[in-house]
Image (cartoon, rainbow, N blue to C red):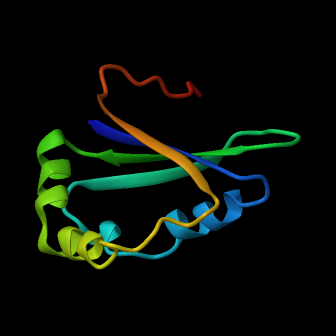
């Protein structure tokens, strides 16, 4: 399994906008090898908010197919030249190969 992780830091009160963007219906769900996507918000009382998006793929090859797909590239090209929303402070990502998974025992 292969995981793409993205951490998006936003100004206070704007995490829900990012959650909505990454949890709505899209084209990624129809891509071969797509397993699931998890969107999490770090619990904070005040200040900057942090949203984590974990996208799981059956393999790195499936992820690469998605990254190189016409629909993925077209979606990014549609946003070229547009300024990022003012509430986004930073965005960083990473790619991980899953080495072990534990599940609950009944």
Quadrant of res 54? top left
Q: Position of residue 78 (x, y in %)?
A: 29, 79
Can residue 39 be seen from the camera position used here? yes
Q: Position of residue 4 (x, y in %)?
A: 34, 42
Q: Nearer the viewer, residue 69 or 29?
A: 69
Left or right of 60, for residue 42: right
Q: Residue at x 32, y 74 (%)?
A: 27
Q: Residue at x 40, y 74 (%)?
A: 82
Can residue 6 be seen from the camera position used here? no
Q: Residue at x 60, y 63 (%)?
A: 86
Left or right of 84, for residue 60: left
Q: Nearer the viewer, residue 66 or 77?
A: 77
Left or right of 19, for residue 76: left
Left or right of 49, for residue 56: left
Residue 100 to residue 42: above or below? above
* Residue at far right of view: 45
Which quadrant of the figure contains the C terminus?
Answer: top right
Residue 79 to residue 16: above or below? below
Quadrant of res 75? bottom left
User: How many numbered markers are drawn?
Assistant: 0
Q: Residue at x 41, y 25 (%)?
A: 101
Q: Position of residue 43 (x, y in %)?
A: 77, 39
Which quadrant of the figure contains the N terminus?
Answer: top left
């Amino acid at each position: 399994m292969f995981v793409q992780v993205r951490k998006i830091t936003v100004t206070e009160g704007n995490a829900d906008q990012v959650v909505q963007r990454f949890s709505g219906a899209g084209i990624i769900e129809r891509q071969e090898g797509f397993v699931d996507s998890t969107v999490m918000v770090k619990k904070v009382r005040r200040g900057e908010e942090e949203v984590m998006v974990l996208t799981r793929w059956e393999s790195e090859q499936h992820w690469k197919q998605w990254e190189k797909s016409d629909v993925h590239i077209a979606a990014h090209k549609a946003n070229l030249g547009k300024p990022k929303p003012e509430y986004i402070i930073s965005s960083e990502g990473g790619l991980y190969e899953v080495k072990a998974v534990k599940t609950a025992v009944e």
